[in-house]
Image (tube, coloured by chain):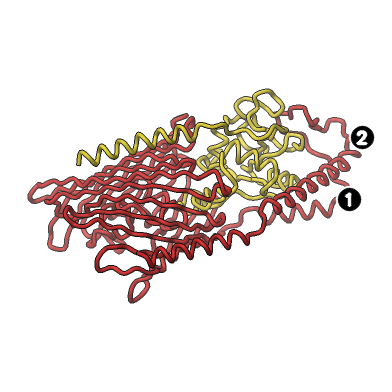
Chain colours: A yellow, B red
Amino acid sequence: MKMTYKRLAAILWTACLMCTLLSWRAEGQTSRGTDIAVVVNPDTPISDLSLADVRKVLLGERQYWSSKLPVVLLIRAPVARERDVVLKVIYQMSEDQFKQYWVAKIFRAEAATAPKIVYSNDMQYELVTAMPGAIAFVDARNVRPGLKVLRVDGHLPGEANYPLR
Amino acid sequence: MHRGLVVTAMLALAAGAAWGQSPPASEQAEQVKALLERVEQLEKRVAELEARPAAASVTTAAVTAPSAAPNPEVQQEAAKPEPSHQMEGHMDQAAVRQMEPHYPNLQIRGFADMDFSATDQKGTTSGFNLGQLDLHLASALSPKISYFGEMTFTAHPTNYTVEVERSIIRYDYNDYFKISFGRYHTPIGYWNTAFHHGAWLETSIDRPEIVKVGGTYTPIHFVGFLVEGNIPSGGAGLAYSVGVGNGRGDTISRPGDAGDNNNNRAWVANVFARPVKLYGLQIGASVYRDKITFAGGRNFREWITSAHLAWTRGDPEFLAEFSNVNHRQYFTNVSTNNPGFYVQMGYRLPWFEKTLKPYYRFEYLHTPENEAVFTNLDLVESIFGLRYDISSYAAFKTEYRRASRLPGTPTINGLFLQTSFTF
């Protein structure tokens, strides 16, 4: 028994060391480009989120803005820059990991649906304005009237230290 | 064993050939990217054209300059599009209508696996076997009510068994309170609620012994109700689940699907944290209490305590779960402890588009000699494996296992192969 626990302690110690070393790397930022604005339906009762809160929303850990208003996640289709930024900065996942994450999330009965995939800015704009609780990620240059832009960590797109770029 | 190695080599060659024949993904991505950029340019052009007449007459319309920060408040209403763009508008509106949620909706997903095993254990034969075919249903009945179902079809020597693994109806009040009724995977520890029956979801070929489906150590299923949700805790990211149900049935590996076999309900409580500053980390603890009644009238109190630590981001992957099952006989008051744990580590290699993931798992399980509920479950096992993700939804896994059970019995070596996928 003692030998087994010693072996367990050795495995745990080695694993912790490996985790620390292997996960210690530069991550989170994409190649520098324009800022990605977080936009919501104008009726959403929120105007400021921390990056951690945005991550909770995108991971499906926060599914309600309020008890009467569910979150509706909209994400651009693959290879759009908005999606790249969301995956790299917020999810910190590859395209495959992202797909697998949502398959697993629904399979665990933690969410009934995956994020809705949108194929253009026009479609994104229409959906955010039409669907209460909708949240989407838009190139700041393409933000249109009728959308509510959220502050992230207290910053708006275009300001220094804005985290989504 | 030798035959197994030959089969491995053949499968490896087949996988290599298939890999070589796959189309160049990067080229396709480039083409799609170029097309999307073109769509973006055209959209911008349309927006410019739409804005021209509006700019002349509506001086108050908010226009976001490329480098300027957008207004934090709701942007003012855009001018109506010109008639020439009404067709695009109709198309977008149709797409929007299609994407709006309709109730009830239904999503079906399947998981399946095909396995090969060869061991040096006397009395066993090597060969292929059809794993589990697993169907998962997810249906939103309204914005706040959803149903989840999971059914498996498992091959046996003379027939197939069909099992309702999970059947859950859940009402969400908000993020802090969600109540559900049905048949669950008992929320004890990590693995049992993280991977369920989809072999493709888990890195390894099989579950650890302490959460083995059909095993007796952990009550895998639970029939009753569950309350779950987040706990307002700032950066700690706490969440909970608390449930009451039938507990173990006459056959202790099964729950009381058709009713409890005593008047004592089982209960379970699980708390875990996903700290905001350590994105990917989950630490948790669970307790489970039940009264086990055997057909002869013998009764035992059961306490299960469990703790887990999981680094779920995949690079590297680290899962560790420790559990202790305590049984006390009501009549004699004899108490026994059955400790068990596993530690699993994996790392997705940076080459070959991160499709290769070597992993190692160590498992330990001990039942004392005077344990009266479990038959002997002693196990010390090491597993060395390699997972190769053939695509986003299919994987090929190979494992070498070295296991010893009772003292004095020979160590068993085995080679295991699996292809698992979701569809």
Query: Residue B32's spot in the image, x, y percent?
Result: 73, 51
Near mark 2 (Cα within 10 A), the count class, few <14, some 14-19 or many ≥20, is few
Quick one: B51 or A26, which is closer to the camera? A26
Q: What's the chain of the residue with tag 1? A: B
Return the residue nearer the eye: A102 or A42.
Answer: A102
Q: How many marks?
A: 2
User: Label 1 sits on what residue type?
Assistant: Pro
> At which x and y percent is residue A94?
58, 44
Question: Does residue B174 show up?
Answer: no
Q: Residue A135: which disc?
A: none
Residue B218 image point, x, y percent: 28, 52
Location of mark 2 (residue): B56
> At 60% from the left edge and 41% from the top edge, which residue is drawn?
A87
Residue in the image at 44% along x and 55% along y: B169
Q: Is residue B289 above or below residue A165?
A: below
Residue type for callout 2: Ala
Task: Look at mark 1 in the image and give the residue it sits on.
Answer: B83
Furthest residue to the left?
A: B332
> In x, y percent, where is residue B40?
78, 45
